[in-house]
Image (cartoon, rainbow, N blue to C red):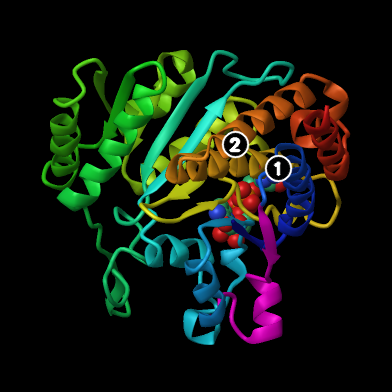
Amino acid sequence: MKILILPGDGIGPEIMTATVTALGALNDKCGLKLDFEQRAVGLPALEAEGSTLSDDLMGRIKATEGVVLGPCDTYAYPLPDEGGVNPSAATRKELDLFANIRPSRARPGVPALAPDMDLVIARENTEGFYADRNMFSGSGEFMPTEDVALAVRKITRQGSRRIAEAAFQLAERRRKKVTVVTKANVLKVSEGLFLSEVRDVAKAHLDIELTEVLIDAMAALLVRTPGAFDVVVTTNMYGDILSDEAAELSGGLGLGGSVNAGDDHAVAQAAHGSAPDIAEQGIANPVALMNSVALLLDWLGGRHGRDDLTGAAKRLDGAIDRVLEDPANHTPDLGGSAKTSQVGEAVVAEISK
Ligand code: NAD
């Protein structure tokens, strides 16, 4: 099975090197028979090929079942007609990666504001407020006059239903609780459509408890009662924001793993961005990207009925737990002084035991 490695921008190459080293060790230890292909994406690709994401690279991405994508410094990209394509948005749209799964779990030994947090956010990933990718053609963000800017938000019955189904399937494997987060008290039509689909899917899962919470209250409840949540299902932008909040509460943004999954493809990508403020210093935390790879392996194992991949995902997750138990392996974002490479080596050592 081919895995496409795309390091990305900022801290991307540093955390990708550590992550691929760990994945290579896992490949050997578990006999996974994974083949790796590495290509440039983002600013290095813009310089070399004139586009942050060329048509050729998109073709490779579509032809590969498992992709590991580094963070992209999209703020620094030129406009699309000057080669600045957002690789995160484009892959989610082109591969129809409708489910963005973002777990946040406080790990033993890691200082956390919410030590009892263990939740997964199931974020709708193809529509909602993200007007740059929610239209079939063109952008949903536009200026009718030079003084007016509009952005169109899209919610569909089908899009809402499939993320609701993904969330309930996740809850079946966990603590059997789903919290749906909306602003249905104000956006009664669009949020109401999302909510009605979640309620309808819940009828087929009577063993799962469904709780409804408004987004503003949820921002507070994540701080007040973080241990109360199991699976959280929500629309695109709320999921993006809440998952950063949850990652930070569970220990830090450098831990926040994430996989973008569709029916046939999945892309592992950390929840955080390219962290330009700490790039090229060798101090970025690679754990979020490693966690993302564990999620990808778990997804590939389920998709292809391969228990070895599912087992490798668990092995990687366990190795990360044991490495983080030792404060000597904490990077500066966790209050330590470890280097990115040191964390990578420690994870490899745990995997190889
Ligand atoms: P960011 O997530 O890159 O950084 C926010 C803060 O968290 C910074 O202080 C950073 O140093 C820290 N941080 C993030 N990841 C870390 C890690 N692995 N280890 C240690 N510290 C870490 O957010 P930003 O600064 O708002 O955005 C920077 C760029 O990333 C922008 O161009 C933005 O558009 C882009 N971005 C990309 C993605 C993505 O590719 N999925 C997601 C979010 C932001």
Q: Helix or strand or loop: what does disc 1 sit on?
A: loop
User: Label 1 CB, ligand 1: below 8 Å?
Assistant: no
User: x and y percent of residue 295 in the render?
Assistant: 54, 39
- Within 8 Å of ligand 1, the CB of disc 2? no
Q: Quadrant of residue 348?
A: top right
The answer to whether one can see residue 7 in this image is: no
User: Can you give x and y, in whole percent of width and height, for residue 90 in the image?
Assistant: 45, 67
Residue 46 vs 195, above or below: the answer is below
Q: Residue at x 57, y 18 (%)?
A: 114
Q: Residues within 10 Å of mark 2 (few under 14, many from 20)?
A: some
Q: Which disc, if any, is residue 308?
A: 2
Within the magenta stretch, is there residue 224? no
* Residue 104 placement, left or right of 136: right
Say whether residue 97 is left or right of residue 256: left
* Disc 1 to disc 2, C-alpha distance: 8 Å
Whether residue 46 appears in magenta in the rendering, the answer is yes
Q: Nearer the viewer, residue 103 or 272?
A: 103
The structure residue drawn at horizontal position 47% and vertical position 18%, both measured from the top left corner, is 226
Badge 1 vs badge 2, beta-carbon distance below 8 Å: yes
Task: Depth check: give the residue in front, 278 or 349.
Answer: 349
Mark 1 neighbour class, 10 Å CA radius: few under 14, some 14 to 19, many 20 or more? few
Taking the image as shown, residue 338 lies to the left or right of residue 252, namely: right
Quadrant for the N terminus in the image: bottom right
Quarter of the image where the C terminus is located? top right
User: What residue range appears in magenta?
Assistant: 34-54
Query: Which label was assigned to residue 31?
Result: 1
Residue type highlighted by circle 2: Asp
Rendering coords of residue 214 (x, y %): 27, 29
Lower sequence index among marks 1 and 2: 1
Q: Is residue 157 left or right of residue 112?
A: left
- Please identify the quarter of the rendering in which residue 221 is found: top left
